[in-house]
Amino acid sequence: AQTVTQSQPEMSVQEAETVTLSCTYDTSENNYYLFWYKQPPSRQMILVIRQEAYKQQNATENRFSVNFQKAAKSFSLKISDSQLGDTAMYFCAFMMEDSGGGADGLTFGKGTHLIIQP
Amino acid sequence: GAVVSQHPSRVICKSGTSVKIECRSLDFQATTMFWYRQFPKKSLMLMATSNEGSKATYEQGVEKDKFLINHASLTLSTLTVTSAHPEDSSFYICSADQRTNYGYTFGSGTRLTVV
């Protein structure tokens, strides 16, 4: 079974600063996907960024980027120029690659509550 | 973009009654949908995988007779909480497999309160 660990229950930074959220995972699989989801107070889950394990290049989506270290099983999220609207819960998630047996659900970490201060 | 509609958003029911929650993929077909449960200030826990035209697959510890899942079409999965008790009160979220970019779209969730 896979496990996902987020060791920072809560973080707080000033607007416009850069913040990094940490995530580690444990798996014996070689092919998988990693995600960061944002859950604002509305509780709608929003995909922030995804990373395919077979890709060495770190994924980037505008102000969001990841540092994917496959050997270390680490998948951190960096948010640059943080904005008030970035305040939310952030969940790191793991998904195994579909090997033909059908899609798998996501395994989530416990989440990090990120607060952006004005 | 892909949209998943989940209804109702909130429901209050009496102990012992059953409640049905619907999850619809509005602009794509989803052979697989997932149901999660989220306790306050906690993470999402996968409850079951819903497969169109076949029986759902439940995670360990989830009572399949209490949480009935039906996936009768490629755009609709339902979760029925049977004989609900106060401990079933929680936030339930569904997601659907788009298969296009290896990401899942989530519904907006259902807050269930059993009194």
Image (tube, helix red, strand yellow):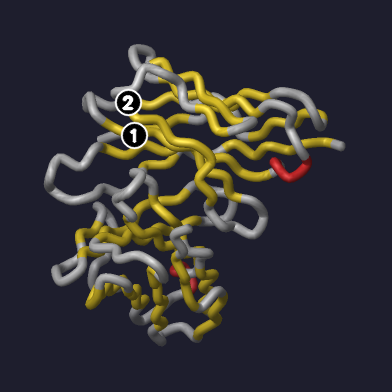
Q: Name the element at disc 1.
A: strand
The x, y position of residue A83, in whole percent, is: 76, 37
Per the model, the C-alpha gap separating discs 2 and 1 is 6 Å
> Which residue is painted at 25% across and 35% down in the image?
A1
Q: Are marks 2 and 1 in contact (CB under 8 Å)?
A: yes
Q: Which of B81 and A52 is in front in this view?
A: A52
The x, y position of residue B78, in whole percent, is: 33, 75
The x, y position of residue B96, in whole percent, is: 35, 59
Please give the residue where the numbered disc 2 appears in the rendered image. Answer: A53
The x, y position of residue A116, in whole percent, is: 77, 36
Indicate left or right for B82 with A111 as reference.
left
Q: Nearer the viewer, residue B88 or B24?
A: B24
Chain for numbered disc 1: A
> Which residue is painted at 23% across and 63% down in the image?
B31
Q: In this view, does B62 lie above or below A6?
A: below
Q: Is residue B58 above or below residue A71?
A: below
Three-letter amino acid code of the residue under disc 2: Ala
| Residue A34 figure quarter | top left
| Residue B69 figure quarter | bottom left
Q: Residues within 10 Å of mark 2 (few under 14, many from 20)?
A: some
**Mark number, residue A33:** 1
> Which residue is painted at 50% across and 45% down in the image?
A47
Chain for numbered disc 2: A
Indicate left or right for B39 with B63 as reference.
right
Q: Residue furthest right?
A: A118
